[in-house]
Image: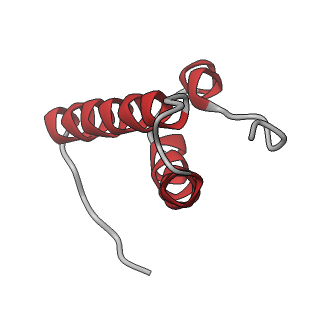
Amino acid sequence: MLGFLFNDRECRELDYVLRKELDEMLFDLNDKRIDSDIKTAIESRYKIIFRMYARLASPKEISKYARNRMYH
């Protein structure tokens, strides 16, 4: 396990980057043109990024990005 110390500005920047990445992945997961194998890889990555975001964000913010397990 690694630990990081971030100041307030760095935390806001990390929060922003993670949110944008989650938004992009959600957009790609809803795109019908993308192959199912690629979507599986995106879903795997989404879980990791979501867990990182969950450590920084409030429960209200987290709920915006929570996906139903039966989604796909």
Q: Is residue 45 left or right of residue 24?
A: right
What residue lies at 48% left-to-right and 56% top-to-bottom? 38
**Measured from the top left, where is residue 63 in percent x and y?**
65, 24
Coloring basis for residues: secondary structure
Residue 72 in which image quadrant:
top right
Q: Give 11 or 50, whichever is nearer the viewer.
A: 50
Q: Is residue 13 above or below residue 60?
A: below
What residue lies at 47% left-to-right and 35% top-to-bottom? 33
Q: Give 34 or 10, whichever is nearer the viewer.
A: 34
Q: Is residue 53 above or below residue 23?
A: below
Q: Is residue 63 left or right of residue 28?
A: right
Q: Give 71 or 15, whichever is nearer the viewer.
A: 71
Residue 68 in which image quadrant:
top right
**Measured from the top left, where is residue 32 in percent x and y?**
54, 31
**Measured from the top left, where is residue 53 in percent x and y?**
46, 43
What residue lies at 26% left-to-right and 41% top-to-bottom? 14
Q: Is residue 13 above or below residue 41?
A: above
Question: Which residue reaches farthest right?
Answer: 70
Which corner quadrant holds the N terminus? bottom left
